[in-house]
Structure formats: C-alpha cells, structure tokens
Amino acid sequence: MNKKVNQEVISFSANKKWLAIPEATRRELERNVWCGNCLDVVQIVNYVVKDSPHGIVLEGNCKNCEKNVARVID
C-alpha cells in the first residue's frame, strides 16, 4: 500500500490564535510574506500554522516559485 501519511503535528492552540485574527487581516498577512528565492513579498500557500515562542508561524510555499517560506506573527 503506497499511501502517503501526513506526519505534520497540528497545533490546535496556534490555529485558535490564527482564527482569532480578523479574516481580512489574515488575508493581508498571507499576501505579505518574504520569499528569499523571488527576493520579493509574495503570497503564502499550502501553509500550516504552528506555535512559536514569538507567537505563531505560518509555514508553507511561495505562490510564485513554490519554494518554502514562513511568516512569524507575534
């Protein structure tokens, strides 16, 4: 059986903090992520929300080049 298993640990507390941010602000944050490959501000896609000592972190991919990007939200 070749079934891919997602081993990502979901942080319910981080997701709760993320959803507490107004939707319009969340959309702005998603579109304001720095991509070191594109050397520009891009939109993050396919992201997960994780807890961090500094707040929460969005970890995902650049919409343009698909490289890994992250955004810390304090």
Image (cartoon, rainbow, N blue to C red):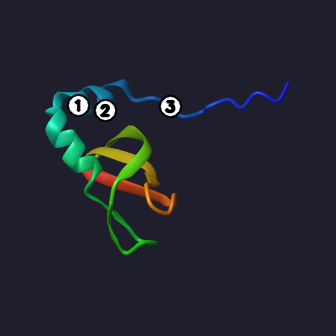
Which numbered disc flags the more N-terminal residue, 2 or 3? 3
Q: Quadrant of the N terminus?
A: top right
State left or right for residue 53 relative to residue 35: left
Give the farthest residue toward the right: 1
Where does residue 65 sit, x and y in percent of width and height? 50, 63
Which numbered disc flags the more N-terminal residue, 3 or 1? 3
Q: Mark 1 — residue? A: 17
Under circle 2, the secondary element is helix
Q: Mark 3 — residue? A: 9
Residue depicted at 33% across the width and 46% down the height: 57
Where does residue 13 sit, x and y in percent of width and height? 30, 27
Q: Mark 2 — residue? A: 14
Residue depicted at 23% across the width and 28% down the height: 19
Q: Residues within 10 Å of mark 3 (few under 14, many from 20)?
A: few
State left or right for residue 1 relative to residue 5: right
Look at label 3 and name its amino acid.
Answer: Val
Give the farthest residue toward the front: 64
Under circle 1, the secondary element is helix
Look at label 2 and name its amino acid.
Answer: Ala
Mark 2 vs mark 3, CA separation in Å: 11 Å
Q: Are marks 2 and 1 in contact (CB under 8 Å)?
A: yes
Res. 54 in view: no
Q: Are marks 3 and 1 in contact (CB under 8 Å)?
A: no
Q: Residues within 10 Å of mark 1 (few under 14, many from 20)?
A: some
